[in-house]
Image (cartoon, coloured by chain):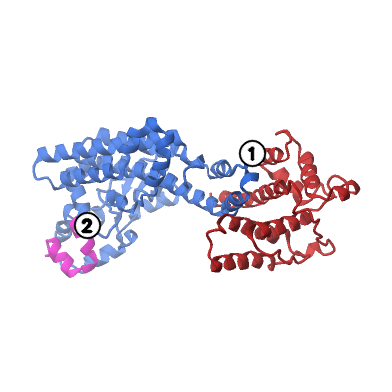
Chain colours: A blue, B red
Amino acid sequence: MMDYQWLFTVSAKWLPLLKDGSVVLNPAANRLIWTATGKFAAALIPGGGLLSAMSDVPAAVKTVAEVVKLAPALMNIGPALQALQVISAIGAGAAVAGLAVSIAGFALVLRRLDRLDHKLDAMLVTLREDLRDLAAQFDDLSMTQLYAGRDSLERALAATTEDERIVSARSARDRFQHVRMACLAVWKRTSPWTNPKMSVAAARELQERYVVAAIGELQASFILGDSGAFTHVARTSAADVRDVMALAPIDALRARTAPTAAIVGDLPGYAAQVRDLPALAADLGAAAEATAANAQRLAAFEADAELPALLEMPGHQLLRAMRDAPGVEIYAFGLERAA
Amino acid sequence: MPEHDQIFDRLHAATEAERTAIAAIFDLEPTATVETLSRALRKQAGNMVLNILRTDHELRYAQILADVVVEAARKAGWPAPAIDEMAWSRWAEEYALQALAFAKVKDRATKAQADEAQALAEGALRRETDTSAVGSLVRKTGMSFAIGFDKVVAAVLVLIQIRLREKAEKDLRRGR
């Protein structure tokens, strides 16, 4: 895997503003944002490693295949470079620093799906009896729905006709939206952070499914080219994670470990709970960090709404480029704006 | 003595839920004061005859713990461990936790697992000694088989939880 800092960095003209605090690096979105407003300020530019690798490529080289042959370090990002026409710009002798970019995180996409370990499913079986009225939501947040959404999304990217792309993207968007809303409904009903019946791992997976569904919905909206819907999903999903799923670890720890007089009847059980308290606290601390990072990441997507316009490239083409460039988790695309 | 001993310190640091649980264990009002809770714990833990000779808060936490350790070992099916008289109460607490938690799984444990758990628990008692405790010999009260001693064990477990929770909360605040 490549280190993205090797690829992209802050351009010199932004350094004074970075130093005086006018702008800050948004690590979740890999771009500079204005400190005061949080709005997009500038894209990152190719870093020393990327420039160094490209400097070995003769100006006459014009195709990605030729570049990758001459600079194997760039193999992983070849498709992305091609999509952004970076190669031809280099070939034409243009200044690389003027080209690149911001973000995206789209590459993470639904790869996260494969990291879910289904801890939640076992928990849902035990909760299903208590929450019969939520049975439909339980079905909607199943992994099957997420896999189906991913399949529709991939079909949308693979489609060779506009009609098929639109139909598949809409199907993906709808499926992901159902999963997202189901996760939210179950979350509101179960209050997982303070609910001793739900393990922290299961709570994290419920949140992760929400985030994966939100990213899937964002990507589907991106393909559909509706920047308004895209912005709405980015904004509301970030707010849901930040507000509804907010985790105050100390409050959660107290709620989960609150003893009752019934402990006299199960001293060994209570002793085991007390013994495991430090591990529980550590889990909650990590979950709080993950929740904050998820909210930040979803909020950062909002600025991507402008990428197709900035690059004059349809959303599905951008996503394809990222999909086809395995090995790099974070990409930097877009055009740098004037300060 | 004790206005400033560990029982008082922990009860003052307890959450409302923790204090209420201890009150319920001793059939007290949920709003019972720290003094009332301390008195109830010490009375329940102490020898009835000796209690007459003691003031309300005289029985030391270390003495109560020594009995809890014996009771925890009994529940785990282990022989009562030899307790260094200067063993820091924290390690005695750890022994009690390990032994009681093992009691939950002892029926399913292999001999090797039981031996390992016992060694781990007894290892806790051989850790640091509390030099400040010199002169304050721990003497068991011999109350561990008394009726209602499970209430004492439960209350002590809550006191242990208070220590662990406070430490965990401090770590969480530092991590922010």
The quadrant where residue A307 appears: top left
The quadrant where residue A155 appears: top left
Amino acid type of disc 1? Ala
Label 2: chain?
A
Q: Which mark is residue B17?
A: 1
In depth, the one of A241 and A118 nearer the eye is A118
Say if residue A235 shows up in the picture: no
Q: Are marks 2 and 1 on the same chain?
A: no
Amino acid type of disc 2? Ala
Q: Which mark is residue A325?
A: 2
Relative horizontal placement of residue B164, taking residue A4 as reference (left or right)? right
Q: Which residue: 48% across, 51% down?
A: A286
- The picture places residue B175, in percent across and down from the top left corner, at 54, 52
Q: Residue furthest left?
A: A161
Q: Secondary structure at mark 1?
A: helix
When the figure is inspected, residue B75 is found, relative to residue A214, above or below; the finding is: below
- The picture places residue A122, in percent across and down from the top left corner, at 39, 46
Q: Which mark is residue A333?
A: none
In depth, the one of B102 and A223 nearer the eye is B102
- The picture places residue A104, in percent across and down from the top left corner, at 29, 49
Relative horizontal placement of residue A110, taking residue A256 as reference (left or right)? left
Please identify the quadrant where the N terminus of chain A is shown.
bottom left
Q: Is residue A65 magenta?
A: yes
Label 1: chain?
B
Relative horizontal placement of residue A237, taking residue B141 as reference (left or right)? left
Q: Is residue A329 magenta?
A: no
Marks 2 and 1, how far apart in space?
54 Å
Q: Secondary structure at mark 2?
A: loop
Q: Which residue: 26% across, 67% down?
A: A52
- The picture places residue B150, in percent across and down from the top left corner, at 70, 48
Magenta range is A60-81
